[in-house]
Image (cartoon, rainbow, N blue to C red):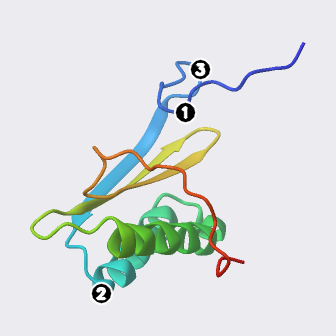
Amino acid sequence: MAFAPQDPRIPDPNDPVVQEGRVDHVPTPISVTRARQYAVRLVSDWGHPTLADDAALIVSELATNAVRYGSVPGRLFRVQLTLTKTRLRITVSDPRGERMPRPRRPSPRDK
């Protein structure tokens, strides 16, 4: 029998939240830098400086996608970091969160 991982959106009562931080950003390129710096500072302040570079990379990639593909004038994107005893969860929500992505067929230019 295979183990099915718990849905990460549902809090695990055996792994309570220790720290949480979130910030909203205007969807501009400079906000990607600010989001990355925020992640580094937060993770380091929480006592996990060895995870700071990895968190910065993940936030940078997700924030770039939010700015590039999910930007809506006048709406913000959110960066949220949640630390439990066993994991660091990084979430970036773009302003088009209500619009679900649709699969597409790759074009000949896609590699």
- Which quarter of the figure has residue 41? bottom left
- Looking at the rendered image, the quarter that the C terminus falls into is bottom right
- Which quarter of the figure has residue 107? bottom right
Residue 38 % position (x, y): 37, 72
Residue 28 % position (x, y): 26, 81
Image vertical order of residue 108 relative to residue 20, above or below: below
Residue 63 % position (x, y): 41, 70
For badge 2, the amino acid type reads Ile
Say whether marks 1 and 2 touch (CB < 8 Å).
Answer: no
User: Which element carries disc 1, helix, strand or loop?
Assistant: loop
State whether residue 38 appears in this view.
no
Cα–Cα span, label 1 and label 2: 29 Å
Nearest to N terminus: mark 1 or mark 2: 1
Give me the disc on residue 30. Answer: 2
User: Which element carries disc 3, helix, strand or loop?
Assistant: loop
Image vertical order of residue 88 relative to residue 86, above or below: below
What is the crowding at mark 1: few (fewer than 14 residues within 10 Å), some, or many (at least 20)? few
Nearest to N terminus: mark 1 or mark 3: 1
Q: How many marks?
A: 3
Which residue shows up at 68% across the image and 77% down it? 108
Identify the residue position indicated by label 1 in the image: 8
For badge 3, the amino acid type reads Asn
Label 3 vs label 2, nearer the camera: 2
* 47 or 8: nearer the viewer: 8
Which residue shows up at 47% across the image and 31% down it? 9
Cα–Cα span, label 3 and label 2: 38 Å
Identify the residue position indicated by label 3 in the image: 14
- Which quarter of the figure has residue 85? top right
Image vertical order of residue 60 relative to residue 30, above or below: above
